[in-house]
Image (spheres, rainbow, N blue to C red):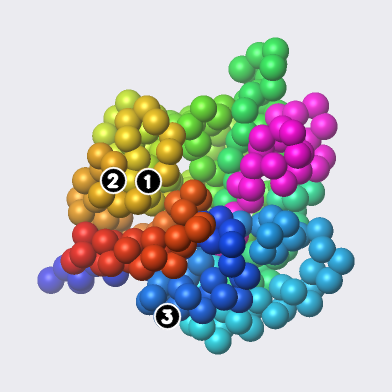
Amino acid sequence: MRPPPTPLRFGYGTNGFTQHRLADILAVLADLGYDGVALTLDHIHLDPYADNLPRRVGVLARQLARHGLDVTVETGAPYFLDPLGKHLPTLMSDDAGPRTDLLRRALRIAADLGSPTVHLCSGPIPDGLPEQDAWKRLAVGIDTLLPTAETYGVALALEPEPYMFVDTVERCLHLAELVGGHQLFGITLDIGHAHCVEEQPVLECVRQAAPRLRNVQIEDMRRGVHHHLEFGSGEIDFPPVLAALRDLGHRGLVSVEIQGGSLDAPDIARRSIEFLRAASA
């Protein structure tokens, strides 16, 4: 007899709680029954350049353990490195050093917190850079980071993001080939993004990403409009998507990603977990 599928584990992104202290976010999510938190490194909740970073990471690790929450580390804060350039610099930029340094710090923080992955995205292609050269730069950037990933035993999980250079699962898989199919390079699949920009159905995106799937983000969305919506406000049929993830045996967090809801974050988090529990039943 085939064993029953592993239940999905739901998390919520700190970028949807920008009006809250991090300790309070953890308490709210634990009380609501979430399994974990998707922690965006930024100036708000955990600054990877803070002078007292080791102490703060240690405190956070103890808080996570006390609440029984897992964590995954994300690096998608859009203006964290450049106050005027969204997601800049990238691993394709002429000076990729700041992005490389941030990702190395993120890998170390992830290891200290017990996160199995560090999320990243490609960012936009630099103006005037030929696509072939962009692929080379991006692959070299990932190759540069993989020894650090090996040291800490933490995977890099690249997210195909609308309107960025790597915006589809297919392009993410191509990048995986360029870095030699390294086992610590994987995919963060955002379900809303897949519905927004992919030519193929969301369920096909899940199937295609499955061999390298490390991390899942989830929200509702409309085709062609990159705006993160509450569940039921967009066009996605979620029960088949959640069933597909469950049948694949996905063990990472499935994290709600609704950045624009910070003023009503506790209520949105409550409605989200109720929706996901019902949709996955």
Q: Amino acid at mark 1?
A: Leu
Left or right relative to 188: residue 267: left
Q: Is residue 248 above or below residue 110?
A: above
The residue depicted at 64 percent of the width and 78 percent of the height is: 61
Kindly indicate the quadrant of the structure image that contains residue 252: bottom left
Residue 69 is left or right of residue 50, and the answer is left
Decide which of tag 1 and tag 3 comes sooner along the chain: 3
Query: Please, what secondary structure does the residue beneath circle 2 have?
Result: loop
- Tell me where the magenta segment starts and ends, as one range: 72-99
User: Disc 1 to disc 3, how far (Cα)?
Assistant: 23 Å
The residue pinned by badge 2 equals 233
Closest to the observer, 133 or 119? 119
Which residue is more in the foreground, 71 or 173? 71
Number of the label disc, if any, that sits on residue 229: 1
Callout 2 touching callout 3 (CB < 8 Å): no
Task: Say what amino acid the circle numbered 2 marks.
Answer: Ser
Mark pair 1, 2: CA separation: 6 Å
